[in-house]
Amino acid sequence: MKARNSRGFTLIELLVVIAIIAVLIALLLPAVQAAREAARRSQCVNNMKQIGLAVMNYESTHQSLPPGKKACCYGTWTVFIMPFLESNALYNSWNFVGDPNNSATGIFTYSGVGNTTVTRTLMSAFTCPSDTPQTPLSSGIRSYNYAFNFGNLGNTQQTTALNGFTFTGAPFSDVMAADKGATTYSATGTRSLAEITDGTSNTMLASEVVQGGTSDLRGFVQWGDAAAYVTYLAPNSTLPDCIYRIEYCKDRVGLNPPCIVSTTTCPSMFASRSRHSGGVNTLMGDGTVKFIKNSISLQTWRALGSTRGGEIISADSL
């Protein structure tokens, strides 16, 4: 009986097969990465919906929106909405007695020993999975990816025009320095949904920010200034954020957005920014979450940042 000849792969055939497999992997990898980013963005949207629900429940309970912040260092919105995110234990461990007018209460700042139990605990609902978690200043205090809307200029600009643009109201502000015209510290720095005369569907409550890094305070939302974003700057603007000390926005050079020292023409302000491609997730006053593209008209974006500007916003402009 004649033996049957068997033939293996030649070297050329093997290399061709390997090349084909490599091409297929190269074609598949972007699709896998896109699918992963879609899942991360979906989780980010879900986080914002949870924050929105917490804000609505807070407003229903207290007849006002939560404070955006309590001065620089004595709590931000992150603390005030904790009971409505099933984080009562953390909320109950926060000491609210801190007062910028009383140096004896310094241990009750966000970095004081009286409150670091809260500020060093990671709240997953405040973290977008598309970003890389950071702990600024090596303090162990957590940074996050969401900030509240302090209007088109920020609540400290209510009587001052900036480069020809004027403040037209914000849904959130400093509980100790109200944007309703107060010039001294007071406890009236909150407003209700009913006071948003532009309409809740035309007004943003929150949007995304990026976590800067170990020496970059962007995303450090447990500090008063970083708890807010303003719409004077467009989403993911190529223009710089402005901060009072340049060493607080230099980390991760080449990855972080531009930043400069604040001036009279660019007071301390942070834009809404994200690690998503093409735009930012944004929480509206009616509880919906919309993906706002970077290409949005700056006029429309600024209008969405105001509560009483009286602007007309068409549905096809978003």
Image (tube, rainbow, N blue to C red):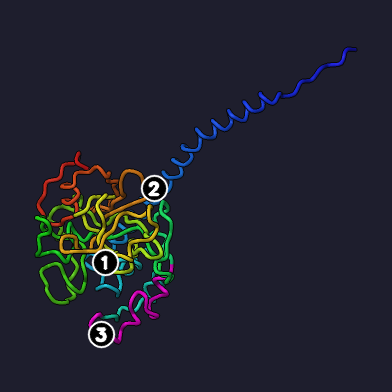
- The residue at 37%/59% (across/down) is 211
Q: Residue at x 19, y 44 (%)?
A: 297
- Under mark 2, the amino acid is Arg
Question: Mark 1 vs mark 2: which is more N-terminal?
Answer: 2
Image location of residue 26, percent across then percent down: 51, 34
Residue projecting furthest to the bottom:
104
Q: Residue furthest top?
A: 1
Mark 2 lies on residue: 41
> Label 3: how many residues lie within 10 Å, few (<14), some (14-19) or many (20+)?
few
Q: Dot 2: within a 10 Å radius of its alpha carbon, few (fewer than 14), some, or many (20 or more) residues? A: many
Q: Is residue 116 magenta?
A: yes
Whether residues under marks 3 and 2 lie with C-beta atoms below 8 angstroms apart, the answer is no
Q: Earlier in the sequence, mark 3 or mark 2?
A: 2
Q: Which residue is mark 3?
A: 102
Q: Secondary structure at mark 3?
A: loop
The picture places residue 237, in percent across and down from the top left corner, at: 26, 50
Residue at the spot of label 1? 225
Residue 86 shows in the view: no
Marks 1 and 2, how far apart at CA: 26 Å
Q: Residue 213 appears in which quarter of the rendering?
A: bottom left
Q: Secondary structure at mark 1?
A: helix
Residue at 26 percent of width and 66 percent of height: 225
Three-letter amino acid code at disc 3? Asn
Q: Earlier in the sequence, mark 3 or mark 1?
A: 3
Q: Which residues are magenta?
A: 100-121
Give the distance between the C-alpha atoms of the residues marked 3 and 1, in whole angstroms. Answer: 20 Å
Q: Is residue 217 above or below residue 32?
A: below
In the image, residue 133 lies at what x, y percent? 43, 59
Image quadrant of residue 195?
A: bottom left
